[in-house]
Each structure stands twice: as C-alpha cells, then as structure tokens.
Amino acid sequence: MNRDYFVRFTYTVMYSLVGVFVLLGLRLYYMQILKGSEYREAADSNRVRVVMLSAPRGIIYDRNGTPLVMNRPYFYASILPGSKGIDVKALASLLEIDEVKLQQRLKKEEKASFNTTVLKEGLNFQDVQRIEARRSDFPGLIIETSLTRNYVYNEVGSHIIGYLGKPTKVQLQDEYSEDITPDTFVGQWGVEELYDKNLRGIPGKQIVEVDALGRQLKVLEYIKPEMGSNITLSIDIELQSVAEELFKGKTGALVALSPNTGEVLALVSLPSFDPNDFVMGIDSDKWALLQDKSKPLINRALQSAYPPGSIFKPLVAIAGLQEGVLTPDLDLFCNGELEYGRWSFGCWKRHGHVSFHKALVESCDLYFYESGKRLGIDRIERYAKDFGLGQRTNLGIIAGSQEREGVIPSTSWKQKQLGKPWFLGETFVSAIGQGYVSVTPMQAAVMASMIANNGVKHPIVILKQKDGEAQVEKSLNIKKEHFLVVKNALYGVVNEAGGTGSAARSPLVSVAGKTGTAQVVRGRIKTELLKEEFRDHAWFIAFAPYDNPSIALSIIVEHGGHGGSAAAPIAKKVIETYIMKNSQPPS
C-alpha cells in the first residue's frame, strides 16, 4: 500500500514537473520565437535613443560669389524620450525658465517616442557651460547643436533672401518634409523658402545608449548630416546696397533687370526688415513694429500695384505706330486742356505745337489723349499685356497668389467688373496711365526691358544664368523701326533740353528713360502743397547704355511727387554703379 502510494506520488511529481517544463518551453517559444523581435525592439527602445542632427544649410551667394548668408551654431537644451526621475523645480532653475512651462514640455516629452523634446532654445556659451556642469544631475538632459543663419547684410536684400523659422503645420505635412521636426529651421519667405528643399540638406542621426534613468552612456552609431546645396543668385549685392541707400528713408521699390537674360540684378522694397530678428524667434515688440502702417513685410516690387502715369506712354506710342494710327511726323497742338462734352482733361503745361518726339520728351498728355482715342482701349490692353503688364511674373520669392496682377482695363473688363459700358473719357485717362490702370514695379521693369530689347522677353529669374542658358519667352512682332523711334525719344527725355528726366543724365553712360507721376488724389493742386500721404507717387523707367542696353529698371518713390526729381536721380546712380562695375576688367 505504501509502495503504491509512493509510486503514484512519484508519477504525479514527475508529470507535474514535465508539465511545468512544457509550459515554460511554450512560454519561451512564445516570447523568443513568436514575439522575440517585438520584445527585442522594446528592450532596445529602453536602451537606445536616436538624436536627429540638423544638416548645415547651403550658402546663398550673389552673382559675384559674395556670401549673403552664413551658418552659425545654435544651442538648445533637450530631453531624451523616456527620461525618468527628473527634479522639475531644480531643472527649471537651471534652465532659467518657468516651472509650469517646463512641466508642460515634459508632459509633451512623455508622448514622444523618437525625437528629443526641446526645453529651451537660443542658449549662449555661458548657458551651455552652466548646464553642462550639472547635466549629470538630470537624467536624459542633453545639449544639442544646430545651425541657423546670420544674414550678413542685415536689411539689405531681405525681401529677396527671406528668413528662417520653425515649420508650419502645412510644412510638417509636406510630402518632401519627412526629415524635419517641429524644431527644424526651414525657409519661411523669399529665396530661403523658394529653394528650401535644396538648401536644407539631409539630416544625420546619432544613436546613443542610455541607462534605465535615461542617462546617456555612449554613442552607438553616428550618421553624418549632408550639407544642403549652395545657390548663386542673379542679384549684385553692391548694386542692391547702393539702390537701397539712395532712397534715403523714403518708401518705394526698384527693380533692375538684365534685358539680355531676364536676370534680376536688384530688387528693392522699402521700408525693409532685418531677417536676423527672426533667427531666435521674433519677440512681440519687434513683431508689432513690422506690422505698422509702413508695412515693411510687404514686397512692394511684387505685391503693390500703382497707376503707372506717364511711364505708360511709350507703350501707347509703340502700339500707335505699329497699328498705323500714329506716325513719327504727326504734330498736334496742346493748349493745356482738352474739352470733351462737359468734361475737361488737362495737361500739366501748355506745350503748343507737339511732334511725336516732343510728346514723349516733354510728356504731353493731350498728345496721348488723342493717341488713346485713335487706338481704343481694347488695342491698348492687348499691347500692354504683350509687354508684361497686368500679369504675374511668378518669380517665386513670394507665393504666386500673393503677387499682384495689377489692372489693364478693357471694355469687357469694365462690363465684367462693374457691369457698365466703357466711355471715351476713360480711354483718355488710361492712355496716360491713370484711371483704372495699375501695374507693379516688377511689371514696369519688364516693360522697360522689352522696349530696350526691341520686344524680346526672357523669363524673369532670380538665379544667375550660365552662358547660353537664357531662354526667350516671347518676341513681339513689332517693327524695329518703331522701337527705334520711341527709344530715340526716351533718350531725349534724359538728354535733351526740356526733357522731364534730365536728372538721370550721366557723363559716364547714355541713359534713356521716362518719368511718370501717379496721382494719389484727383485735382490740380500742386503736390508740394499737399500733406505727404496725399502727394503723387514718382515713377521712372530707364535702360542703359542707350545703344546696347545691359540694364533696365523701374523705380517708384511713394508720395515722392515728380518722377523727374524724386526717382530719376536714383536711376542715374544705380545705372552708373552697374556700368562702372561691369566695365572694369576682372582682377
């Protein structure tokens, strides 16, 4: 009996042990075979952290190889994901930030599974030294280094270059932005935004081993970031600097183009801003200044449209010659005023007998009232659009929809916009660049470039073109002799007695141009008697050298009064700077 009990007990124990080992084996099989990779990954995630390393951005150069931006180190304190045992109060004191804000950021870190969480940005060297001295007291606390920008010329060219900032939600969702984090600096405006993907480069990674508290033990792997591509702009920073300085605190815009390539040589919009203010995150006081009524963040060269005034007349003259309604020999009489029904359309002075040439040289309005009448508004509209007016250039340094189209009216335009028929009196004022007509400074520069180049237009570009790279976008079917007649008159505007643009006359280079005055308020009150905000805008378009143009430009000085006195002197200095620099043999 005792023997049978012992045998049964022995078998029971043996079967129980076998069962235990089978269960253990099945559990081990489940954990190591079926779930092995999952558990290994979980173990590694507790042991390993991945730190993203920002790539150095490419450098932006001007057309002569002068760097416009430089990279500079940017330090910030971060916490590794999964870090535990942190004394929040002591850490807040060390980082010199609000304890509540720090707690919020640490809660955000609890949800992070891959990237570090930034606790404080923009540390200086003294901050880094102080934090490094006590970093071992705070598990998972690290100092990270990134690169941000130093905009070498401060405000100069800022509307072209743009600035960096933290990515928007849209940018984070961009299919090309899988390598950026919420703390990556990306282009937010201008060339920095337009070519962000080229400039940004490829980030690297640092894989580090940490202990149970999240403290870094060693670097397991280092993947070096790849620097972004450098780009060379078409602008000449010296020309840009001279142009901005010449405005002397005035508000306005200037666009200088190469008629032979379509390259932007200078693009000025004033007042300006310093993109360095955005590097560390702009404070509320500076942001408020940038939102004032002078609107320094608006790119006036592309986003503001103005009545062109008399700079529109060369286009009407070319159209009249090509359509056969004007001839170089046509003389009219200007008594200072045109009566039409109960309306009166004035000229800025009584010119007497006016030839085609004199009408442009002295800017006779009555001559162009008649020219507009003979052409009709619809033909004027067609030629204006052929010369790039009323159309976006899509240069890209601002969002396409933000570039102003301006207005080139027609009979159908008025009917569509206002539901009213077109009247002859509206043709009169349109022919001298007033009324509904409005253009951007960029469009005015395109028109000047096409006149200089006998109707040839190249795509407008902001990158320097290689030899033979320039493409022809269009070539107008207009007789060259018509261009020659008009260009000869534009030479007279600057160089003949009585010409309205004599302030642009230069002993160094032959300049051709056209002044313009854009009315801000109607009436014949002398502009110098008005308050500044009610004074006329001053225009000037020009190209040089007259016989073989290499630069064409447009200038507007807001509330500057007369183009001949406010804008033409700027054109003279800008053109001379460009010609002198480009006539010198390379060193």
Image (cartoon, helix red, strand yellow):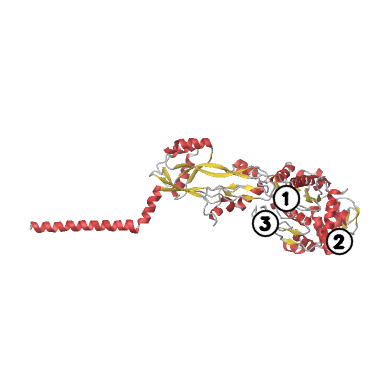
Q: Evaluate if marks 1 and 2 touch, with contact meaning CB atoms under 8 Å apart.
A: no
Q: Secondary structure at mark 3?
A: loop
Residue 111, x across and y down, in percent: 44, 49
Residue 95, x across and y down, in percent: 49, 38
- N-terminal of the pair, mark 1 or mark 3, is 1
Q: Evaluate if marks 1 and 3 touch, with contact meaning CB atoms under 8 Å apart.
A: no
How many angstroms separate mark 1 from mark 3 (CA)?
A: 15 Å
**Residue identifier under label 1:** 255
User: As shown in the figure, which amino acid type bears the numbered disc 1?
Assistant: Val
Q: Residue at x 37, y 55 (%)?
A: 38
Q: Classify 10 Å Cα crowding around label 2: few (below 14), some (14-19), many (20 and above).
A: many
In the image, 21: left or right of 568?
A: left
Q: Evaluate if marks 3 and 2 touch, with contact meaning CB atoms under 8 Å apart.
A: no
Locate the C terminus by quadrant: top right
Instruction: Check the image and report above or below for 250 versus 308.
Output: above
Q: Classify 10 Å Cα crowding around label 3: few (below 14), some (14-19), many (20 and above).
A: some
- N-terminal of the pair, mark 3 or mark 2, is 2
- The quarter of the picture where residue 241 lies is top right
Q: Residue at x 78, y 61 (%)?
A: 383
User: As shown in the figure, which amino acid type bears the numbered disc 3?
Assistant: Asn
Residue 395, x across and y down, in percent: 67, 55
Q: Secondary structure at mark 2?
A: loop
In the image, 28: left or right of 460?
A: left
How many angstroms separate mark 1 from mark 2 (CA)?
A: 31 Å
Q: Classify 10 Å Cα crowding around label 1: few (below 14), some (14-19), many (20 and above).
A: many
| Front in this rendered view, residue 403 or 568 | 568
For residue 394, the mark is 3
Instruction: Check the image and report above or below for 545 versus 481.
Output: above
**Residue identifier under label 2:** 326
Q: Nearer the viewer, mark 1 or mark 2?
A: 1
For residue 550, the mark is none
User: As shown in the figure, which amino acid type bears the numbered disc 2?
Assistant: Leu
